[in-house]
Amino acid sequence: MFEALQLGPFLFRSHTLLLLIGIVLSTELFLRLAVSEGFRIAIFLKKAVWFLLGFLIGGRLLAILLLHRVYTQDPMRILIVWDGVFTVVGGCIGFGLVLLFFTWRQRGTFISWIDVLVPAATLLIAFDWLGRFFGALSYGK
């Protein structure tokens, strides 16, 4: 795997580095699009922990479902969260489900929020795949 950057004891691989850059840029794009559409973004400031948990849990659950053969042989591996098994698509789905829940509770329109979420999610998925390519994780067989 390509080592991108080492700062003291921390080693940032290209996939991790590009994924973090993608998260920051897609969050910025999401919030800017929401403001330009006239949406109230105070919900994200108040419920930021829920959106973060939705992203992390959704990404982990989809990764476990995709690798179900590994986890059915050893179910205790589900508790090992530091193994790096995570999907960004699942994270976006988890974020969308949390957004659906909070827009439903506040009697908002979820469909109009999807118009804001999709471009940001696309940008994040693009950075994820670039990081996977540069980290030699997704070359194929």
Image (cartoon, rainbow, N blue to C red):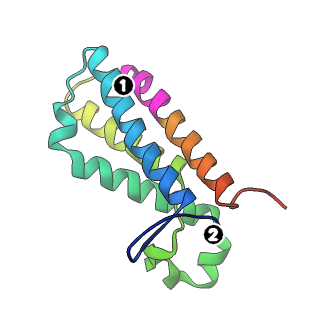
**With respect to residue 25, does 39 lie above or below?**
above
Which residue occupies 48% across, 55% down? 17
Q: Which residues are magenta?
A: 109-120
Q: Quadrant of residue 127?
A: top right
Q: How far across and down, in percent of the image, does residue 111 sit?
A: 40, 22
In the image, what residue type sits under mark 1? Trp
Which residue occupies 32% across, 24% down? 32
Residue 113 numbered mark, or none: 1
- Left or right of residue 19, residue 104 in this image: left
**With respect to residue 114, does 72 lie above or below?**
below
Q: How far across and down, in percent of the image, does residue 74 sit?
A: 58, 85
Magenta stretch: includes residue 39 = no
Q: Residues within 10 Å of mark 1 (few under 14, many from 20)?
A: some
Q: On the image, numbered disc 2 is attached to which residue?
A: 68
Which residue occupies 48% across, 29% down? 118
Along the viewing direction, whichever of 107 and 18 lies nearer the viewer = 18
Along the viewing direction, whichever of 81 and 13 lies nearer the viewer = 13
Main SS of residues in magenta: helix
Outermost residue, right direction?
141
Q: How far across and down, in percent of the image, does residue 86 sit?
A: 52, 61
- Left or right of residue 54, residue 128 in this image: right
